[in-house]
Image: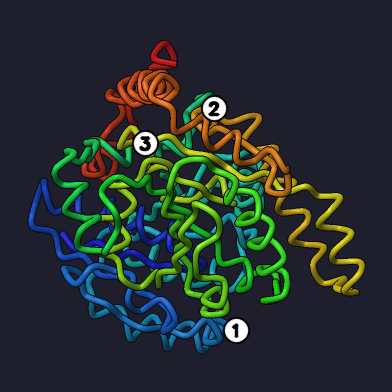
């Protein structure tokens, strides 16, 4: 069977982490031929196990160009097409035309959702309404997409069936390899690449990080604060701030990224939907989500006269609303980025008693998802088992 993943708008690392995980799980069950159609920008994200085909989004403008592109990929002889990103673009007519060509050749189509937030669900419903009885089913990743309600044509997939928990010896080896002290705590921060979507400037990133570092430098114990981001402009901030050693690492080094994440004592993020936060929770590591003081942010943006940042403000508000409503996000501890007492919240999360309480909550949550299907069960079955009693 040939399966093709088509990343229509999967342009974040998290999207590809989940898509790769889903694809690898398929290979555990059978020797499928798996293809990834990706943009040039995200060429390195799909695993080397899969066939990669590069496409440019600009080709999806006219019907003749769509047909030309379809002929190029028709040689894949795809049986199942898994698309990422369709509801987010509200069922673009051009993409609909492309899907029609697959359907006419008898290809079964799934839409892969990063989560099942109300906004994504309403987008999916819009798509169905716009195109009538369009034969499209949806795959929602869990645990980000906690199935808090049963929805027709939605398949909930448990994306982390096995927790990867490193031993103390393995963590120490990671520290030694990265020239970190064995006695110091590791605080790992995965930064969302907001610059890509909302034209966030380096000036704004520095504004945020200087506040974070200033507050975290008050932590009493010696700590390594490791920031994962592709932005080179963070490098000037590297150095020692009180008891805090700040290091900036390139996101492209996936091996180091994984080792440091799983060896950390606390994982921070500015985005509740990051795969790093999910993996940390699955590995029973405490997590902290930064809430942005919107009044301060708005003040900064107004001062710099950056009206184009308004979508960014709206996105931050959406993230906070998600945290309030989604069951998974209850595992995340939250703190204000600009709070002068941020270091107190962090110190609390590094205490043994707090860590034990958090781990118990994490374990109970992930055990509650064990009944959800694996990827091959979703693509081979018409209906997935769903038991709301587990939640």
Separation of residues labelled 1 and 2 (CA atoms): 42 Å
Above or below, 129 against 142 in this view is below
Measured as percent of width and height from the top left, residue 270 is found at: 59, 51
Q: Residue 330 carries which label?
A: 2
Q: Badge 1: few (under 14), some or many (20 or more) residues near its Cα, within 10 Å?
A: few
- Determine contact: label 3, label 1, CB under 8 Å: no
In this rendering, does residue 135 appear at all? no
Measured as percent of width and height from the top left, residue 51 is found at: 21, 75
Separation of residues labelled 2 and 3 (CA atoms): 14 Å
Measured as percent of width and height from the top left, residue 353 is found at: 41, 19
- For marks 3 and 1, the one nearer the N-term is 1
Q: Quadrant of residue 249?
A: bottom left
Mark in front: 1 vs 2: 2
Q: Is mark 2 on a helix, strand or loop?
A: helix
Q: Quarter of the image for the C terminus: give it.
A: top left
Question: Label 1 belongs to which residue?
Answer: 61
Q: Quarter of the image for the N terminus: give it.
A: bottom left
Above or below, 113 against 147 in this view is below
Identity of the residue drawn at 26% across and 64% down: 178
- Name the side, left or right, on which 98 lies relative to 32: right
Above or below, 268 against 257 in this view is above
- Determine contact: label 1, label 2, CB under 8 Å: no
Measured as percent of width and height from the top left, residue 21 is found at: 27, 52
Question: Label 3 belongs to which residue?
Answer: 285
Q: What element carries label 1?
A: loop
**59 and 71: which is toward the camera:** 59
- For marks 1 and 2, the one nearer the N-term is 1
Judged from this view, the residue extending furthest toward the left is 31
Mark in front: 3 vs 1: 3
Separation of residues labelled 3 and 1 (CA atoms): 45 Å
């Amino acid at each position: 069977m040939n399966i093709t993943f088509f990343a229509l708008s999967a342009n974040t690392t998290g999207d590809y982490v989940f898509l790769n995980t889903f694809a690898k799980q398929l290979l555990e069950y059978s020797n499928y031929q798996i293809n990834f159609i990706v943009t040039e920008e995200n060429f390195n994200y799909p695993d080397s196990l899969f066939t990669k085909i590069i496409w440019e989004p600009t080709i999806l403008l006219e019907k003749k160009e769509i047909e030309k592109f379809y002929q190029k990929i028709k040689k894949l002889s795809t049986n199942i097409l898994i698309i990422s990103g369709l509801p987010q673009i509200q069922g673009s007519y051009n993409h609909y035309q492309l899907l029609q060509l697959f359907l006419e050749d008898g290809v079964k189509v799934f839409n892969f959702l990063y989560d099942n937030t109300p906004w994504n669900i309403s987008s999916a419903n819009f798509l169905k309404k716009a195109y009538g009885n369009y034969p499209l089913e949806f795959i929602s990743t869990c645990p980000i997409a906690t199935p808090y309600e049963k929805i027709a044509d939605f398949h909930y997939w448990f994306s982390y069936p096995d927790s990867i928990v490193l031993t103390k010896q393995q963590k120490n080896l990671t520290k030694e390899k990265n020239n970190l002290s064995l006695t110091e705590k590791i605080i790992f921060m995965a930064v969302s690449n907001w610059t890509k979507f909302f034209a966030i400037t380096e000036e704004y990133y520095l504004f945020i990080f200087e506040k974070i570092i200033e507050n975290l430098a008050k932590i009493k114990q010696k700590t390594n604060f490791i920031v994962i981001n592709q932005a080179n402009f963070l490098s000037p901030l590297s150095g020692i701030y009180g008891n805090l050693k700040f290091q900036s690492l390139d996101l492209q080094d996936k091996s180091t990224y994984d080792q440091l994440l799983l060896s950390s004592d606390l994982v921070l993020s500015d985005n509740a939907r990051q795969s790093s936060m999910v993996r940390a929770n699955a590995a029973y590591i405490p997590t902290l989500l930064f809430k942005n003081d919107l009044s301060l942010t708005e003040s900064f943006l107004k001062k710099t006269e950056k009206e184009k940042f308004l979508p960014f403000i709206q996105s931050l508000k959406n993230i906070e609303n998600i945290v309030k409503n989604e069951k998974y996000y209850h595992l995340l501890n939250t703190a204000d980025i600009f709070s002068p007492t941020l270091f107190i919240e962090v110190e609390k999360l590094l205490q043994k008693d707090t860590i034990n309480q958090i781990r118990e909550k994490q374990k109970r949550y992930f055990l509650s998802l064990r009944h959800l299907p694996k990827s091959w069960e979703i693509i081979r079955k018409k209906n997935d088992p769903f038991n709301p009693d587990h939640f």
